[in-house]
Structure formats: C-alpha cells, structure tokens
Image (spheres, helix red, strand yellow):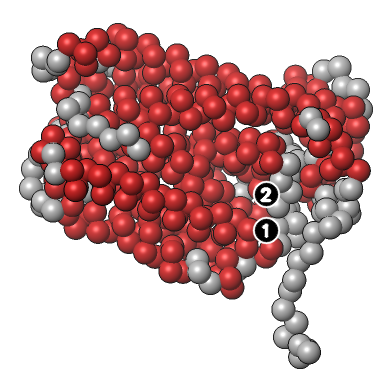
Amino acid sequence: MSEVDILAATRRTTGKAPDMRATLESTPRALPGGTLQMGLLGVGIGLAALAYGLSTESHRTLGVLLTCIVYFMGVSQGGLMFAVIQTITLGRWGRPFKRIAESFWFFMPVNYAIYAIFLIAGGLDIYPWTHETMPEHKAIWLQPGFFVARQLAMLGFLMVLDFVFIRNSLRADMGTAAEALGTRAPSFWANFTSGWRGKAAEAEETYQKNIRLAPVIVVLYAIFFSFFAIDAVMSLAPHWYANMFPAWIFVSSLWLALNWVCIVSVFFKAWLKIDMILQPKHYHDLGKLMFALCIFWTYNFFAQLLPIWYGNMPEETWYLILRMYLEPWAPLSKVVISMCFFIPFTVLLSRGIKKTPNSLVAVAMVIAMGVFLERFLLIMPQVWFKNSLPFGVVEVGVVIGFVSAFLTVVLNVLARVPALPVSDPFMHEHPDDVHVHANHGAHAH
C-alpha cells in the first residue's frame, strides 16, 4: 500500500473534529501588549553587547555569537523537523503544536544571515586551522573559501526545501481560513492562495506534496546538519573527532525545538485561542517525547564518552579532560549533565507532571537552558583560555538579543497566520483512539 493509499484509508476513519472557530475568528491577531517594544529592546541590548564585546575581547565575543548561532539553528530547523515528522508518521497527537513548530523556521533566514556575516566578516579567525599548518588531508577540507561556500550552500538549499514544505502547509490553511473570514483575511494571504480550488482539493494536494517532500527533508537534514556540526563546532578542535558527534547535534536540535514548542505553547496559548484545543493528553504526549529524547541525548553522550575514554588515546581524551576535569569548565559540565539528564529524567517519570502544562514548561525551560550550556561547553573552551568562566555582560546581552529576536519573529508569524492547521484532517481524533482519565470521584472495580 502506497503512502497516499495509507493517507486515504486513515482519512476514511477520521473522527470528530475539534472546535477551532475561536482561533480562526481571532486571525489575524494583535501582538500581546508590549511584545514588540520588549523584543526590539532585547535586540538593541544584544547589538550593544555584541559591539562592546567585539571592541574589547573579540574572540570571546565571536565564541558566544557562534554558540547562539548553533543553538538557534537547531531550534529553527528542529521545529520544522517536528512538523515534517508529524507528516511522515500521519501523527495526530502533535497536530495542535504543528503551526507553532513551523513558525520557528521563520527565524532560520535571520540566523542564516547572521551566520553568513559571521563567516565572511572575520568569524573564521577563531578557528585554529586558519592559523596553523594542517595535515594535507585536512587542509583540503579546511580551506576558508570552500568552508564558507559549502556551509552557506547546504543550509541555503535546505531552507529552500523547508520553505516549499511550509508554503504548502500554509496554503491550505490560509485558503480555508479565508473562506471563513471573507474580507477580514489579510491581503498577503493571496500570495499563498492564488488559484484556490476549495478546501477538499487543496488539503488533498497539500498532503500528497508534503508526504513526498518530507522524507527528502529528513535525509538532507541529517546530512547537512552533520556537516554543520563538523564544520561549525568540531573543527574548532581540528585534531579531535568523534563519529557520534554529528548525530548528537542534529538529534538534540529536534529535542531542543520540542522544549521551545512547549514553552511557546504554554505561555501564548491563550493569546492564540488554542487553550481549549491543547488538552492535558497533548502535553502528556509531548512530555513523553521530551523524556525519550532526554534518554537518547544521554545515550549519544555515553556512546562517545566510553570508546574515547577506554581507548585512552591522548589525541581524543584531551577533549574530555579539558571539559570534565579541568577548571573552569569542570563545574559547568556537571551543571550540563544535571540539566540535560538528571533533572528531566527524574521529573518526567511522573505522568502527572507531563499532563500539567505549568509543570512541564518548567522542565522544558531547564532543558532549553541546559542544551545552551552544552553548546557553550563544546565551543568556548576552544576560544577562551583563561581560568575563569566567560560569563559576563557580553554573554548575557548577546543571549538576550537572540532570544528576543527569535520570539519577536515567531510571535509576528503566529499573529498573521492561522495558529492551528485548520484544513488538516489529522486534527480530527481517530475513532479508535482511547484516552483513559482517572475518575477521582468513583472507585474502580
């Protein structure tokens, strides 16, 4: 049976649709009060911190800038990958989160532009291979022009495919919403919905296109983000390597995006008018996936740690010793493993916490911060050589700038498009799904 046949069979067993009128009628919506002003202020703080840092300690500042680029490249592309995976698996549970996840991608072009400027305007100066004579087999790969060209070409090509996927997704939803909103529909939607042929035909065509495109994006994501991890992060230590390192980066990027989906959905679901759609069962499923990827992150960590450590080869073990046993990085490594494994693993064992959005979002914030510190720990020891941790005004300011820019872009997108995939048949419950809820007012027999 083909993918399209499976899709058609699944649709024939579609159950009751949720009531999405509230979010549909609120589209487009005004930004929450003060959001734009706070976002612009945060971006201004980030730019000021960046300018100050570059004029005082340029390598340290370029290091934290690269950390933020790598981190938000993962958040942006990871959000799109969540939507792609939902499409491939014909999943229903995550559909209410799909538009939030897709909105993360719109920060990707911004981050891509920052990365391009970083590479072209002097960021390569922090890479040792630009100053050292490298072995011939590495010198061929680590040439500045080739490095910049392949990074921008691969990420740029992936962005084009991402945009085609998102455009298909938005077209069906915008057209469906425009039928309901009439003249209240934003005029720019016409750029997505020209030649509209009705909800049924467009929804079917959208899925046929995206189901075929999604596996291509998955494969290219794994390949291109592997090269991104090797070039942007691993080549900071050009004589060290680990086979599992690229997978660690691209899988943890998906995990990172899931935590940001949780954060944005909890804090802004009332504004998006999706609070009646997002039920405890949805957060329970999201929490289970967060828990599973927490374990997978730890597996990837030990899959690299054990062979390197017990192989006891100096050209490999120094990387671990520097971060895990030497000051000032050793305490930070303990914080990272606690925030990325011990805390989420212990807390997310609880079904009740996974079903309580306010509790789950606290865990998501711990993980999101822990992954940032993990990226910081991978990058900064190759850039900063003093005996104190490089945490100061510059680092805090640059991070504030990136977070503010990311949230400003995401919220502006969500303000202008349907916050739910309103044309998506997989928003409907499957009639064979059974959700068991505890009834505290009755006794089980």
**Sooner in the amino-acid sequence: mark 1 or mark 2:** 2
* Left or right: where 213 falls relative to 390: right
Above or below, 325 against 208 in this view is below
Q: Position of residue 28 (x, y in %)?
A: 74, 39
| Mark 1: amino acid | His
Task: Report the amino acid beneath label 2.
Answer: Gly
- Residue 94's tag is 2
Disc 1 and disc 2 in contact, CB within 8 angstroms: yes
Q: Quadrant of residue 195?
A: top right
Residue 330, above or below 119: below
Residue on which the image places disc 1: 282
Place of residue 271 in the rendered image (x, y in percent of width and height, measured from the top left):
67, 52
Q: Position of residue 307 (x, y in %)?
A: 25, 44
**Quadrant of the rendered structure where residue 443 is?**
bottom right
Q: Residue at x 38, y 24 (%)?
A: 227
How busy is the neighbourhood of tag 2: few (under 14 within 10 Å), some, or many (20 plus)?
A: many
- Residue 338: image quadrant is bottom left
